[in-house]
Amino acid sequence: MIEFFEYMWATRAEVLRHTVEHIGLVGVSTILAVAVGVPLGVVITRRARLRGPVLGVANVFQTIPSLAMFGFLIPLPFIGGIGARSAIVALVVYALLPIVRNTYTGITEVDAAVRDAAVGMGMTDREILRLVELPLAFPVMIAGIRVATVIGVGIATIAAAIGAGGLGVFIFQGVSRVDHLTILAGAIPAALMALILDGGLHLVERRLDWRRKRT
Amino acid sequence: MSAVSFEAVSFSYNGKAVLGPLSLSVPAGQTLVLLGQSGSGKTTALRLVNAMLVPTSGDVMVLGKRVKEWNPVALRRSVGYMIQDVGLFPHMNVERNIGIVPQLLGWETARTAERVRALLGLLRLDRSLATRLPHELSGGQRQRVGVARALAADPPILLCDEPFGALDPFTRAELQLEFRQLVAELEKTVLFVTHDVREAVHLGDRVALLDRGALEFSGTLDEFQQSTDPAVSALREYL
Ligand SMILES: Nc1ncnc2c1ncn2[C@@H]1O[C@H](COP(=O)(O)OP(=O)(O)OP(=O)(O)O)[C@@H](O)[C@H]1O
Ligand SMILES: [Mg+2]
């Protein structure tokens, strides 16, 4: 234990740098995944024919082993290569399923009678989405983003294998040197990060839940 | 002049005829009560008026214009709609619920706020309720909010689908009385669906009776009271 803290203290500059890299990978990829996933989730509530293919593809993406995914991306032009860009693309791909699925579920779970009332008030489809469906679906959507973020923190450790940095750097070093202290220097901050993000987003989820708030 | 009229209107769900052919008109400023058993087509008839449903044949006229010629969104914003129980938006407080149609119509916030205040007063809802969510209200208060919301943009026509159905007899009687005074004062044209005969004679200027999608009787309240039609006299037993 003390040994571990001494090691962390001695390498604190590196720990900090890789932590920041890690947050960057997870943060950027989650934001991109939300930017792509939420509209996709909305679209498949409007176009039933796209639902199967979109959810199917997102599902298949999720089953690709992460190391293999990073490997596939290396030779690709523009989106691939060695480094953070490939890592972010891979992380976005993994984050899509929970975000798309929860957006879709959250919206379709809105009470049909409430949607009916919205139509009866003379709301356009966009107004129904903005004023009724999205606010009611928010807690479910945030829950999906939470899952995506926690998964992302874990998968981002593997991004070190293709030179994207992050806390995985310690883990790969530690594994190759059979040095558990180094492994822990990557694993423990990553685990803490997952816990903190999970807790934080849980708070956001509760704050945005209309049942708990008067707006 | 009729504010709403059905001209040989029929409606089917997937080829199964559920209404009509129905011809019926509601003079401006009057209240027509639609009576009929469950499944007789009352809700269907109402929803043909605000273009939630489209007739299979015939035409519904609203304010002198065919419903199919109206822009559905514009039509719905000029026709107040009240639904039993579920109509309020669960995530919006009382104030936002009442102000929703003015908001859709692009009223300035100050004007909407003023209108909401006036309606809270009109429906005898305490100011302190303005920031509550629907699930934090009693059933009677929710229905009052429903009435206020339907009146918010001052539509000339109101469609009411059993709005007081879930209330206890006391609250129900109180709301019926207030509702009658309110629509008379504001000169609204009202289509009011109920299967409660007492409510019908209490609120209606005219009564129409639907039976399995067909119009069994239609006339003024006096005609309803005096009709010798067996179906109508049977209903009067409930008075
Ligand atoms: N979405 C639908 N699809 C198919 N049939 C429907 C649909 N909605 C209603 N119906 C049928 O149309 C008929 C008329 O229904 P409607 O809702 O107008 O009855 P109602 O008079 O309002 O009854 P209630 O008093 O129970 O509300 C019924 O036989 C019903 O089963
Ligand atoms: Mg009905």
Image (spheres, grey):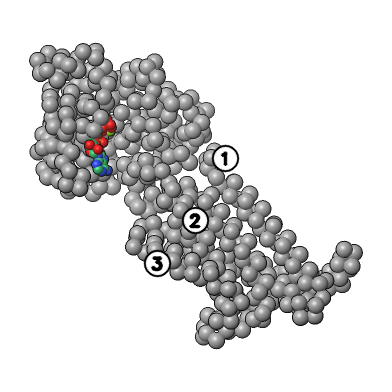
Left or right relative to A79: residue B85: left
Q: Is residue B224 visible?
A: no
Give how far apart the Cα atoms at labels 3 and 1 are: 36 Å
For residue B7, above or below residue A53: above
Identify the residue position indicated by label 1 in the image. Answer: A212
Mark 1 lies on a secondary structure that is helix
Residue at x 44%, y 48% (from the top left corner):
A109
Are marks 3 and 1 in one subunit? yes
Task: Tell which of B237 and B157 is nearer to you.
Answer: B237
Residue ID at (41%, 51%): A108
Q: Residues within 10 Å of mark 2 (few under 14, many from 20)?
A: many
Circle 1 crowding by C-alpha within 10 Å: few under 14, some 14–19, many from 20: few
* Amino acid tagged 3: Pro
Q: Would you name the residue on which mark 3 appears?
A: A53
Q: Amino acid at mark 2?
A: Asn
Q: Residue B202's x, y, as percent?
A: 26, 17
Residue B228 vertical placement versus B142 (above, below): above
User: Do discs 3 and 2 belong to a common subunit?
Assistant: yes
